[in-house]
Image: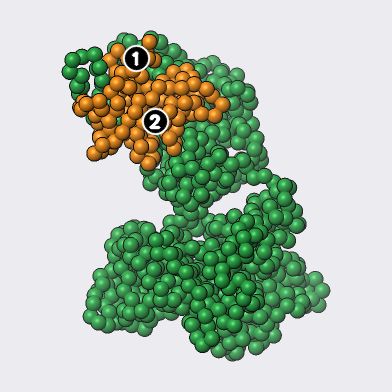
Chain colours: A orange, B green
Amino acid sequence: MMITGDWIDVGALSAIPRRGARTVPVMGGEEIAVFRTGDDHVYALVNRCPHKGGPLSQGIVHGDTVACPLHNWRISLANGAAQGNDHGCTPTIPARIAAGRVLLDRAAMIAATLKVAA
Amino acid sequence: MDFPIGTGADLAPELEPTDQADRAPPHLVVIGNGMAGCRAVEELIARDAGAYRVTIFGAEPHVNYNRIMLSPVLAGEKSFDDIIINGREWYDAHGIDLITSDPVVAIDRQARTVTSRSGRTVTYDKLLIATGSDPFIIPIPGKDLPGVISFRDMKDVDTMVAAAAAGGDAVVIGGGLLGLEAAHGLTLRGMKVTVIHLMPTLMERQLDEAAGWLLKSALEARGQTILTGADTAEIYGEGKVEGVRLKDGREIPASLVVMAVGIRPSVALARDCGLAVGRGIQVDDHMVTSDANVLAVGECVEHDGQVYGLVAPLWDMCRSLADGLVGKESPYKGSVTSTKLKVSGIDVFSAGDFSSGEGCEDIVLRDASRGIYKRVVLKEDRVIGAVLYGDTADGSWYFDLLKKGESVADLRDLLIYGQAYASGGALADPKAAVAALSDDAEICGCNGVSKGQVVACIEKGACSLDAVRSTCKASASCGSCTGLVETLLALQLGDEVQAGPKTMCKCTSFGHDDVRREIVAQNMRSIPEVMQKLHWSTPDGCSSCRPALNYYLLCALPGEYEDDQQSRYVNERLHANIQKDGTYSVVPRMWGGLTNPRELRAIADVVEKYNAPMVKVTGGQRLDIFGIRKEDLPAVWADLNAAGMVSGHAYGKSLRTVKTCVGSEWCRFGTQDSTGLGVKLERMTWGSWMPHKFKIAVSGCPRNCAEATIKDFGVVCVDSGYELHVGGNGGMKVRATDFLCKVGTEAEAMDTCAAFIQLYREEARYLERTAPWIERVGLEYIKARIVEDDLGREKLRARFLFSQQFSQADPWAERVAGAAAEQHQHWGEFRPVTLNPILEPAE
């Protein structure tokens, strides 16, 4: 993992399966789930469903939504909000791809994971 | 060879002639058990089932099958069973004597008898010649070498499949419809194929130059070598074919040569007995030859100077023939034909005349980026021909316009854009487009069913797709007209259409059963392909349809389909059961519920080593270790593997457990070795993916300690054998099993279990347990398939065991060996509070 300025390089995009996720534990904070969609966008969310805390990284990714593996709540990858009739929101971390690498916003990463932990 | 006969030849001499005339219907003998002969008999039966006693002679060893579907069989998209039109039961039901593998070799019109190759002589009152056509073999050196074949019947397909299995190169001589379908099938079966075509463009009789070129490019992109303007000089080889030499000297090595340059009406029999023969056997408008007692139909006939090599004219001929036989006037007026190439992924349609003669106008549309070419030929404001490449959706509309021959002057400007546009927007509604089709517009090309016939069948009470299929056969073969039939149902019945099953999910308008059928019919091989071909409304489905599609493909293509891990629920992806805190539980397999000290020690060691907070005995007689983190799973599995244990699939839509009681080995009441049978059943069935979880139990006596009567498949042993029960459920809605049958031996119990599971795997909807499935389809149906149909049961069992070859690899061992490590390992770790927060990537 390389840190350049405010962006943290967490690894190569190719290390995440399409429509899948990888997890990044944060020391002293909540685990982060980094998602890759079918059309190669990346999103980072705290790995915790707003419903009962299910590990979103293990859900089925479709479009830019993930279905929580515990009770099938659908969470928007773009803004962390529960879809449909469910209410709740998971913190998100800005993510982008540069030269095939996945970069996460460092400050947001710390803030998001500590906020949930607290 | 023994065949049931009881024909006129054997019986007539024993009967008083006058009595016979009063009682017995006249004898119709049919030469040819192909599409034309049997269709004619079908039409006759539909008019007056008792009018004739029927005997059919066939040269092939098979029942009546759909010859035009041989291409999909060669391509591996269908099996022979799929293309049978009339099985044995049809012949039996109508009292038809079928004599197979015994072609007629002579006709004596004076004595009114036919004689077969085996020497059998049969008298007739009416004779129907339906000998079809023979492949044309170019008279060149080497044409008789082993390995040189034509593409005409099931035997040819078998030969090609065997040749492809042996590997090597193939040459197909002839770039027409048949040759290209043969080349396509052989390519799919892994052969390197060269097509040799005498003319400058492919399918020149059906396609113009532009479409021929598009077709050639598409085939080349699939790896075929296409040599146009190539003239074959000889086929060479020592003792068997080794290659083909062209007149320009080029040599193409090949272990198989398929000659598909054309067909000729098979007229030898007719000519030998003195019937009038031109290019084909000459017939009148009711298919009667120059002898009033002899009829002929199909590709062997010449009507009004025309011979036909396609299937469509046959349907009309058979109607006129049958009407004639029952004394009704309905003359055959010749046919206009259209052509579709059956090469999946390449859509080609052509009809009528497109050789731009005098007074003809062409309207052409090209869309290069989408690979579309359309050409409609007009003469005096009437459509006389159409060639479509890439988008053939409007083929039936153009064909309908062509047959009607009405003026299209009003449509002219928009004609080429298709029916939806040309009809002024009103028909942008596909329902209106179908409503506008004329009654004789063809809906189902495979079975020759017109719109009028489908509508009549709906009016007679068919109110679902299945009902239409089973009555008039529309959409029952390749399924490509399913949408049209459904639209007709909707138009005729409005809201009364028996709502087929609900759609799979909001991503599609298809129900589970439709999707499964289309996956098999169109030989779809991946989730994206299914979504593309069935018009999914979302880019990559949802969490409902993706696991279902993954299962359907896995079930349809055992050993070939590559499982999509990202379409699996978490438990099946991680081969463990997720718990509410995000940790997992692990259940190793214990065959039949038996265990031993080594396994128990290994489980105890794992519990201590990974600080598992709980171990529990499950309802299915297994041990469940709780609280394991996903990253520790491979290590836990490695320890369990080392003690000889494999995955218990407690997490899967799959065989879960086989629960047993101790049985005759220990129990004073036990009647059979229930533990032993339980272990055998579990060894046979473990690892198989199913629509939902599946539980088995074996009880050693009717006291039923293993609770077999609330399992998906339960065995209750009794003194005299094994009672087999199905469809039980102990979950939210308790349901006791239905009694399926009783068998005498363990082997029969195992076979029945395998067949039942395979039927469930192939026909239940995803996430449908056996209990609701059986309530939906009915126990009688299950019995008919599993108990009463010995051959069917055996086939189901064989398919189950075949698919089990590919599913009985322990998924835990694969993960221990490093497979799918990304599913378990974290992607490094981030330590924000250290001064130098760089961590080791785990990738």
Residue B74 in which image quadrant: bottom left
The residue beneath circle 1 is: A114
Helix, strand or loop under label 1 = helix
Residue B646 in which image quadrant: top left
Q: Is residue B496 left or right of residue B572?
A: right
Question: Eyeballing the image, is B808 above or below B339?
Answer: above
The residue closer to the viewer here, A91 or B678, is: A91
Give how far apart the Cα atoms at labels 1 and 2 are.
30 Å
Q: Amino acid at mark 1?
A: Leu
Closer to the observer: label 1 or label 2? 1
Q: Position of residue B487 (x, y in %)?
A: 65, 55
Q: Is residue B496 left or right of residue B545?
A: right
Q: Residue at x 48, y 34 (%)?
A: B543
Question: Eyeballing the image, is B110 above or below B540?
Answer: below
Q: Are marks 1 and 2 on the same chain?
A: no
Q: Residues within 10 Å of mark 2 (few under 14, many from 20)?
A: some
The residue beneath circle 2 is: B573
Q: Position of residue B734 (x, y in %)?
A: 63, 23
Q: Residue at x 29, y 21 (%)?
A: A107
Q: Residue at x 53, y 41 (%)?
A: B507
Q: Name the chain under label 1.
A: A
Question: Looking at the image, can residue B738 be seen?
Answer: yes
* Mark 1 touches mark 2? (CB < 8 Å): no
The residue closer to the viewer here, B288 or B543, is: B543
List the single residue furthest toward the front.
Answer: A5
